Amino acid sequence: MKYTALVFKNLIRSKRRTFLTVLSIAVSLFIFSALVSIPTVANQILGNTASSTRIATHNKAGLAYSIPVAYKQRILAVPHVEVVVPESWFGGVYHEVYDQFPNLAADPEQVDQMWPDWGISKEQFAQFKKIRTACLVGGDTMKRFHLHIGQQIQLKGTLYPFNVTLQIVGTIGGKAPPDFLLFRRDYLEEAAGRPGIVDNIWVKVDKPGNVPQVIAAIDEGFANSSAETISESEAAFIGSFMEQYRTFFRMAEVLGFIVVLTIGLVAANTAAMSIRERRGEIAVMRSMGFPSRTILSLLLAESILIGLIGGVIGCGSAYIVLKAFSVGNMGGPLGAIRMPPVILAETLVVAALIGLFSAMVPASSAARRNIVDALRTVA
Amino acid sequence: MDEKYAIDLEHVTRIYKRDEFEVRALDDVTVQIPAGRFVAIMGPSGSGKTTMLNLIAGIDHASSGRVAVGGEEITGMKERDLAGWRARHIGLVFQFYNLIPVLTAFENVELPLLLTSLNKAERREHVETALKVVGLADRMDHYPRQLSGGQEQRVAIARAIVADPTIIVADEPTGDLDAKSAEEILGLLVDMNRQFHKTIVMVTHDPRAERYVDTVYRLDKGVLAGVEPGKRGAPAEAAAHG
């Protein structure tokens, strides 16, 4: 504690340099924390939503291909299957292109049994079953667009050549993705001219242990048909859905690390400059009896503090910005991107590491330098 | 090594390597300085004065020979132990003051005390006393840039004495000062020596310094060329010539 004043005074020795260093670290960590939040959010969605008894069945050719809705009845006949809900991705936008959030249509009858972890109240579910244009909306989307129950909204079709007008009858919470919108597939089916196809069929089995057996039975049942299926657990399905964004995620992560590395080098240069200017003072302190270890600790503490201040400003701003704008359009159909607390913590660790490693080499070399040689530079 | 000597150098040689050349900065120098004396090391540039001072201050190592200061032999000490030893025994005064520019006079003087176990109140008391001794009690909150050269050197002297070291080592303490300030600083060093019985070793080019010291050690080309009494009147120290 007795060295706090010394560290602080050295920190503000060159206010402009410290300010610019803090600012550059803050900007880089703003970018880093925002970019790294994207894949983390995707993984969190996976972790939060996946159930061990739900199976997704879709066309073996890929998610872009449909399967006949008639498969529902055959799947229901497979032993251990309890609930079957066909579902189609509508992919509509609200008002403008950037007003996106995930929106799907599902058969309404058994939604509550398929997703009991979505926190839909009995009353709201009854309304959902009763009104053909009803929809359930995630809390984040409600908040983002200032929606309320009873309100009518229109989603513009992007995959379908028509719009749908929906009435909000309830909110989705619990473990559901917070931006989700779910409406009735019979409405979509009618508007689309009853094509009799769906994107995938959700299946709920009685016990997690029976999942592999049911998956095998479903896929064998539709083998050699015109629309062969591939069934997978919910975790695997969401994972493969996320897979299409994997390159984007990787790029985001790589970009984040490149930014941090670049700023780390800039910070190292600044630290080296700052320490080089103080070689004489360091030598004087050592001649007074300050051990090399103490000098090294003081220099590193100073640099770590600069990193941490930059980190707090950078990731704090990113957190606030992402939260304030609830940037749903950034995540597109994935939904809003928010910074998980773990990223806040990780960013602060990265900030401290930038401080530590940027000063490590010049600080240890200054702390170990021959005192007489260093004093000569002062004279 | 004899404990009655504050400083005891025996056959000390210091060789520096400059690229492929060897420079013999000190060559077989033997000097004993009794405790409580104020001595000057004088000689032309390159005579080895500062090298000798650095060896006494424990910030340089002898290539051969033995160095004992304050009754402790420091020749073979490791850097970590030497740092602790310097903190206890040595107070350094430099030609260019070498105060930390971002710290006030008070904080500069407090620096050596950060290495002690004194608490904040005790440190404050010591610093105030030291600054009072050098006549700068009213400049505690001034930064070095707000002080004159003479005042800066006074702060440096306060910093050197604040931890009550055995020996004060001064390297050209008047070298950067005008005549009046130089006289004041030399007078202050005499006060330190007389009032607080500090052993003071000073490297200087300043001929005025002879009037203030007990003994003058003259070095030339790395060897001890002579030991003379200072004009202050003290007898010459018994010194073996290397």
Image: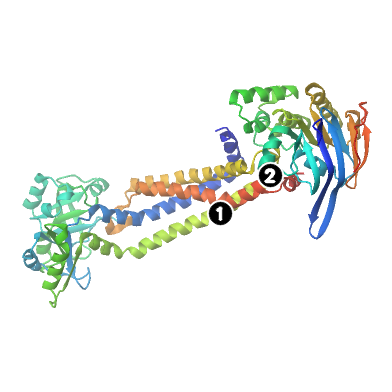
Q: Whole-percent x and y of residue B189?
A: 81, 28
> Quadrant where the C terminus of chain B lies?
top right
1 or 2: mark nearer the eye: 2
Q: Label 2 belongs to which residue? A: B78
> Quadrant where the N terminus of chain B lies?
top right
Residue A7, image quadrant? top right
Asked if one can make out residue B31 in the rendered structure from this viewpoint, the answer is yes
Q: Label 1 belongs to which residue? A: A266
Q: Relative to A180, is B114 on the left or the right?
A: right
Label 1 close to label 2 by CB (< 8 Å): no
Q: Residues within 10 Å of mark 2 (few under 14, many from 20)?
A: few
Per the model, the C-alpha gap separating discs 1 and 2 is 36 Å
- Is residue B68 depicted above or below B23 in this figure? above
Residue farthest to the front, as pictured: B1
Q: Relative to A137, is B112 on the left or the right?
A: right
Q: How is the image coloured?
A: rainbow
Name the chain letter of the residue that bears numbered label 1. A
- Is residue A165 depicted above or below B125 in this figure? below
Q: Residues within 10 Å of mark 1 (few under 14, many from 20)?
A: some
Q: Amino acid at mark 2?
A: Lys
Q: Whole-percent x and y of residue A152?
A: 16, 50
The residue lying toward the viewer, choosing from A256 and A349, is A349
Find numbered disc 1 in the image and state the secondary structure of the residue it sits on.
Answer: helix
Q: Relative to B134, is A232 on the left or the right?
A: left
Find numbered disc 2 in the image and state the secondary structure of the residue it sits on.
Answer: loop
Count of numbered labels shown in the rendering: 2
